[in-house]
Image (cartoon, rainbow, N blue to C red):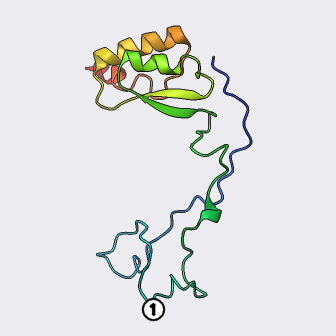
Amino acid sequence: KIVPRSHPKIIKKRTKAFVRHHADRYYRLKATWRRPRGIDNAMRRRFRGTAPMTKISYASNKKTRNLHPDGLLRYRVFNVSDLEVLLMNNRKYAAVIAHNVSAKNRRAIEERANQLNIKIANTGARLAKEENE
């Protein structure tokens, strides 16, 4: 069992997504954030009643940024040798097996991770699917 390093409580200042200006008005505009840049744009000018814009004050605490609820950061692994990087950092990082790794290599990565006491976040991803077939 891997015990992560101690860290402050993870507090997100905002969890709702920032919505693009007029995305609710026009179907052709997706809701994904784009900064308004028009000279007369009310949102850019921060008029009352407009949606909030992104700004640096919404950023998370630097110590807890990118931390997952289990207290570990994620490190993407493509092969067995990538696990050696996490050998001394297994209390800070958890391995994530990349999506394009074969089931055979996944098994080898998981075996080596157990030997090195490294947590794998997406363990058994492709393996369970193959056993059912």
Q: Quadrant of residue 29?
A: bottom left
Residue at 33% of width from left, 32% of height from top? Answer: 99
Residue at 56% of width from left, 28% of height from top? Answer: 93
Q: Position of residue 59 (x, y in %)?
A: 61, 57
Q: Position of residue 3 (x, y in %)?
A: 67, 22
Q: Position of residue 122 (x, y in %)?
A: 45, 28
Most extreme residue toward the bottom is 40
Q: Position of residue 78 (x, y in %)?
A: 35, 25
- Vertical comparison of 24 with 119: above or below: below
Most extreme residue toward the left is 133
Q: Please rate how many residues cluster around mark 1, counting C-alpha atoms within 10 Å: few if below 14, some from 14 to 19, many from 20.
A: few
Which amino acid type corresponds to the residue marked 1 in the rendered image?
Asp
In this image, 23 relative to 9: left or right? left
Most extreme residue toward the top is 115
Check disc 1 and report its element: helix, strand or loop. Answer: loop
Name the one closer to the observer, 24 or 113. 113
Quadrant of the snapshot with the C terminus: top left
In this image, 91 relative to 100: left or right? right
- Vertical comparison of 24 with 11: above or below: below
- Residue identified by numbered label 1: 40
Residue at 33% of width from left, 24% of height from top? Answer: 126
Residue at 47% of width from left, 16% of height from top? Answer: 84
